[in-house]
């Protein structure tokens, strides 16, 4: 069970993307209370409207620990403790070889992929650890185990995020044992808009956002010890 008798409360960090909208809709359909967070007020409101009328949009700079602390205060005051944190903040930057991995791209990836995860997972760690439904979920990449010189920045940032998530999972296991941290691995995500824009493409190995969303919902129905520390390849 989640905290108390309430339906599970899940926060989607970086919810304005197609994956965020699909995940919010799937969680809502599974009977959960859903908060979706982004840095752009208009975009996150539009995403919440697209996902469902009960999805609540919140605005926060997830790379700013002070702003995330304020977000946690608002969530706890207005909605209660979290049962799920779905980390979808990301982005991709490439380059030409190792020398072409720019500092600017690294800063963007480090900020979006790792810093936001550190901030949110620390702010809501106690909630997730204390909840029988507690789940921290991130989306990683196949490039972590098959990095190339051209995507070194990206693969390194994703590898760091995976390491952080596994560490959170170890913390759960050594604490109450009630929470679980899970890494979902994709080659790339593809949505209906991308398919419509390029109908000639087959997108081999890509993961549809609906499949990602359904997988995330399914993690809440499995025992924590069965999924904690799992690295699930959806590619």
Image (cartoon, rainbow, N blue to C red):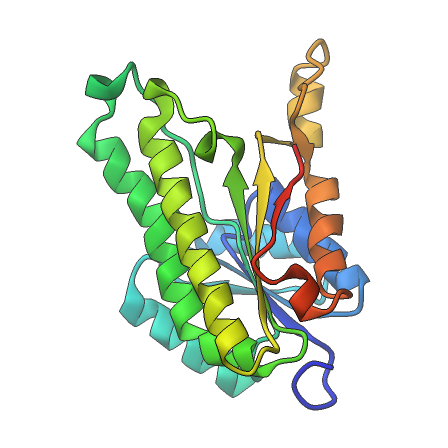
Q: Quadrant of the N terminus?
A: bottom right
Residue 194 seen: yes
Name which quarter of the figure residue 221 lies in: bottom right
Residue displayed at 65% across by 18% down:
197
Q: Residue furthest top?
A: 200
Name which quarter of the figure residue 144 lies in: top left
Q: Residue furthest front?
A: 174
| Residue 58 horizontal/vertical position (percent) | 50, 65
Residue displayed at 66% across by 14% down:
198
207 shown above or below 220: above
Residue displayed at 40% across by 63% down:
60
Name which quarter of the figure residue 11 lies in: bottom right
Locate residue 116 relative to residue 138 in the image: left or right: left
- Front one among 82 and 36: 82
Locate residue 212 relative to residue 44 in the image: left or right: right
Residue displayed at 49% across by 77% down:
174
- Front one among 55 and 89: 89
| Residue 112 horizontal/vertical position (percent) | 36, 47
233 shown above or below 193: below
| Residue 13 horizontal/vertical position (percent) | 50, 58
Q: Quadrant of the C terminus?
A: top right
């Amino acid at each position: 069970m989640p905290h108390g008798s309430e339906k599970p409360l899940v926060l989607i960090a970086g919810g304005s993307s197609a994956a965020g909208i699909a995940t919010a809709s799937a969680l809502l359909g599974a009977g959960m209370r859903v908060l979706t967070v982004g840095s752009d007020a208009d975009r996150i409101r539009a995403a919440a409207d697209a996902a469902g009328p009960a999805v609540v949009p919140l605005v926060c700079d997830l790379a700013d620990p002070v702003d995330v602390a304020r977000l946690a205060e608002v969530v706890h005051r207005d909605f209660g403790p979290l049962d799920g944190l779905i980390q979808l903040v990301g982005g991709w930057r490439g380059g030409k070889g190792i020398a072409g991995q720019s500092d600017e791209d690294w800063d963007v990836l480090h900020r979006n992929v790792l810093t936001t995860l550190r901030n949110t997972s620390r702010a809501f760690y106690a909630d997730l650890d204390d909840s029988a439904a507690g789940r921290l979920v991130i989306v990683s990449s196949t490039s972590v185990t098959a990095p190339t010189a051209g995507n070194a920045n990206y693969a390194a940032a994703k590898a760091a995020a995976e390491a952080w998530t596994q560490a959170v999972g170890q913390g759960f296991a050594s604490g109450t044992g009630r929470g679980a941290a899970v890494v979902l691995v994709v080659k790339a995500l593809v949505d209906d808009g991308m398919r419509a824009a390029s109908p000639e493409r087959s997108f081999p190995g890509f993961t549809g956002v609906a499949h990602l969303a359904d997988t995330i919902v399914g993690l809440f129905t499995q025992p924590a010890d069965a999924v904690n520390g799992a690295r699930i390849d959806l590619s």
